[in-house]
Amino acid sequence: MFSFSRRKIRPSFLALSNFVTLNTSLSSQDITRRCLDKCRDAGNALRLPDTLVGQIAALSGSIFTDGEPIVLGYLMQVVDRWAEIVGQDTEGRPLVPCPISFTEEERSQQREDQAKWEEGVVLMDEILDRLGAYRGWDGFVSHADYEARKRLVLDVQERFFQQVATTDDERSLWCKAWPFPVSDK
């Protein structure tokens, strides 16, 4: 068993443990709220996913696959809220100059790209729903299910192309973008 010297524990955690011990008549929500207020580091860490910084960090991993319009939109929000993020002087100017900027044309393009990206997400969800699959499914199936799943994928693909492609050129483009190719092997 580990034993810790109270001198090695950060003062904020000591205050937190003393507070919880002395206030056991409070509801668990009150204790949680007060603990997070007393221990700012823990509170900030738990709130991170709900912050702009947390959302950017979460999406940055998908920038190379499909999240670029969303990450770019968050970066534009950072630019817009820069003074709030880094602090401002008495005249409302940021304490640190913002290292990036966007033109109105770039902002307009981002809005268009994000709308298209969101439409793509909806289309992918519809395809996955028709296939009985889940987000992140890579198309692998068991050998026993292969023929049935192959027929299902081809059927869903054909219905999808009929729904979205009005010309042979459009069909060819959608065929190249189809995420679940079926092998005849």
Image (spheres, rainbow, N blue to C red):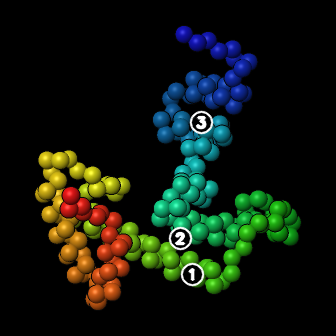
Reading the image, the residue beneath label 3 is 35
The Cα–Cα distance between marks 3 and 1, rounded to whole angstroms, is 44 Å
| Circle 2 residue | 69
Image coordinates of residue 55 in percent, x first then y, are 55, 57
* Quarter of the image with the C terminus in it: bottom left
In the drawing, what numbered circle is on residue 62? none
Residue that appears at 16% across and 70% down: 155
Apparent side of residue 36 relative to residue 135 in the rendered image (left or right):
right
| Relative horizontal placement of residue 143, taking residue 88 as reference (left or right) | left
Residues marked 1 and 2 touching at CB (< 8 Å): no
Along the line of sight, which residue is nearer the eye, 33 or 61?
Answer: 61
Q: Residue at x 36, y 72 (%)?
A: 177
- Most extreme residue toward the front, as rendered? 185
Amino acid on which the number 3 mark rests in the picture? Cys
Q: Residues within 10 Å of mark 2 (few under 14, many from 20)?
A: many
- SS type, badge 3: helix
Q: Is residue 99 above or below residue 145?
A: below
Local crowd size for mark 1, using a 10 Å CA cut-off: few (<14), some (14–19), many (≥20)? few
Badge 2 element: helix
Residue type at numbered disc 1:
Gln
Residue occupying image coordinates x 29% and y 82%? 171
User: Which residue, given by chain and number where applicable, does mark 1 sit on?
Assistant: 109
Pick out the residue farthest to the bottom.
Answer: 167
Q: Residues within 10 Å of mark 3 (few under 14, many from 20)?
A: many
Q: Is residue 51 visible?
A: no
In the rendered image, residue 141, in percent from the top left (x then y), is placed at: 23, 50
Mark 3 or 1: the one toward you: 1
- The Cα–Cα distance between marks 3 and 2, rounded to whole angstroms, is 37 Å
Q: Quadrant of the N terminus?
A: top right
Q: Is residue 34 above or below residue 16?
A: below
Q: Position of residue 22 (x, y in %)?
A: 59, 24
Question: Do we see residue 185 in this rendering?
Answer: yes
